[in-house]
Image (cartoon, grey):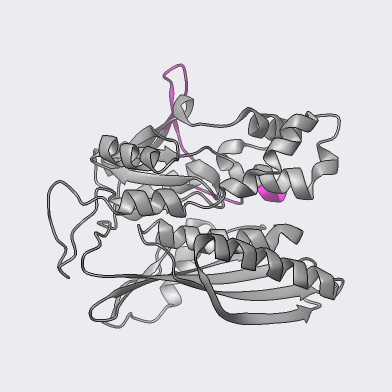
Amino acid sequence: MKTGKLTNEQLSSIVLSKLPKLSDNTLVGADIGADCAWINLGDKLMVISSDPITAGGMQSGTLTVHVSCNDIAACGVHPSGILIDIVAPSSATEEDISEIVTQASREAEKLGVDIVGGHTEVSDSVKTFVVISTAFGLVDKEHPVPRGKARAGDKLIQTKMSAIEGSYIAATEHKSKLFGKVSSEYIDEASKYNELISVVTEGSAAGSIRSSSEEKNKYGYYYSAADLMHDVTEGGVLGAAYEMAHYSGLGVNVYEENIPISNASRAICKALEIDPLRLISSGSLLIASAEPDRVIAAIKDAGVEAAVIGEFTEATEGFRITDKNGRSFEMAPPGADEIYRI
C-alpha cells in the first residue's frame, strides 16, 4: 500500500464499514471529513479527537499537541486535556524521549491544556518517532456549536496560509536538501512556523459567534455562524476542502489565486518539487459559513488573518478549482501527502 492516509474509498471499505453501530450517547462518530466525535454527557458535550505524528522526527512533541488540539478547536471548542502515546525507535536515546516530552509539555502549557495520561515505549517496529495524541474539550449549553455540515452557498474561509507544517518540517528535518536552492532567510523563516501551528485562537473565535438565525439543534444548543470547520492536515488545503464538501454531500469551488502561501513556502516547495496546496498545513483552518464577514471580523479581532478562498456548491457541480485565468478544473480527491515525497 502507498504511504500516507488511506484514500476515501479505502477508508470507507476497509475501516468505516467494519465499525459497530454507535450508542445513543455518541452524537457524531467516525466518518470521512469528521475530525472529532461528539459525546453526550447530559448537561455537557465532550468533543474528542486523535491524531498521529509519523513524519515529525525530533519535532514530534511540538506537533502532536497542536494537531489534536486543532481538531478540537475546529469544532469551535477550546481543548481541555490531552493524552500522548510515544513509540520511540530503538536508536533513540533517553535524551531524545525527554526532548519529545519537554516539547509537548511546553506547547500544552501555552494552550492551557492538561496532559492527563498516555504511554511511552521503545519498539523495533518503528524507524522514527511515532507520537499519537488524543485531545478533548467540553461544551456547556451556552456555547454555540457548528451545524456539522456545510451548506450550498456557504463561503470557504481559510486562516493564515497554506503549507505551514510541511514547510516547518522541511526547514527543520530536511534542511540539507534545501541548501543551495532556498535562501537562508526563507529557511530560517519556515523553521519558526511551529509558532503558527495552533488554530485554537481562530477556532475558538469563530466558534463563539452565534448564528444570526438564532436556531438551535435538537439538543438545545444554538448554532454558531461557522457551519463547519476543518484544520488543514495531511492532504493540504485542497484535500481539506474536498473532505469538507464530501462530508457535507456538496460540491466546492476553490479559487487558487485567493489561497495564501508565503514566499518561503513557495521557495521550499519549488526546491523539493512538491505541491504546496497538497502539503500538510496544521496551523491553517478552513471554515464554511453563510456569514463570512462576521466570522472573518471575529478572527481578525483575535489577531489572525483570514480570507475567502472559495464556496460550497450543489453536489452536481462537483469538486472544482479555478485558476488565476478563470479556467476551472476538476479537483482530485486527497491522496498521500506531499510530505512523504521529500
Left or right of 168? Residue 246 is: left
Examine the structure image and report whether residue 197 is included in the region drawn in magenta. Answer: no
Give the image quarter of residue 125: bottom right
Q: Please indicate, yes or no, whether residue 61 appears anywhere in the rendered image.
A: yes
Q: Is residue 42 above or below residue 280?
A: below
Q: Quadrant of residue 328?
A: top left
Q: Name the spot of residue 54 as percent of width and height, x first.
A: 68, 62
**Whether residue 126 is visible:** no
Q: Residue furthest top?
A: 325
Q: Is residue 136 above or below residue 116?
A: above
In-image side of 3 versus 236 (left or right): right
| Residue name at image x 63 percent, y 49 percent | 194
Q: Position of residue 16 (x, y in %)?
A: 44, 70
Left or right: 103, with 28 as reference point:
right
Horizontal and vertical percent for residue 284? 50, 45
- Quadrant of the drawing holding the C terminus: top right
Does residue 340 belong to the magenta stretch? yes
- In terms of depth relative to the viewer, which is nearer, 327 or 298? 298
The answer to which of 43 and 155 lies nearer the viewer is: 43
Residue 101 in which image quadrant: bottom right
Q: Specify the quadrant that holds the N terminus.
A: bottom right
- How far across and down, in percent of the image, does residue 30 sit? 40, 69
Number of marks in picture: 0
| Residue occupying image coordinates x 85% and y 34% | 179
Q: Which residues are magenta?
A: 321-342
Q: Tell me which residue sits at (49%, 46%) in the image.
A: 239
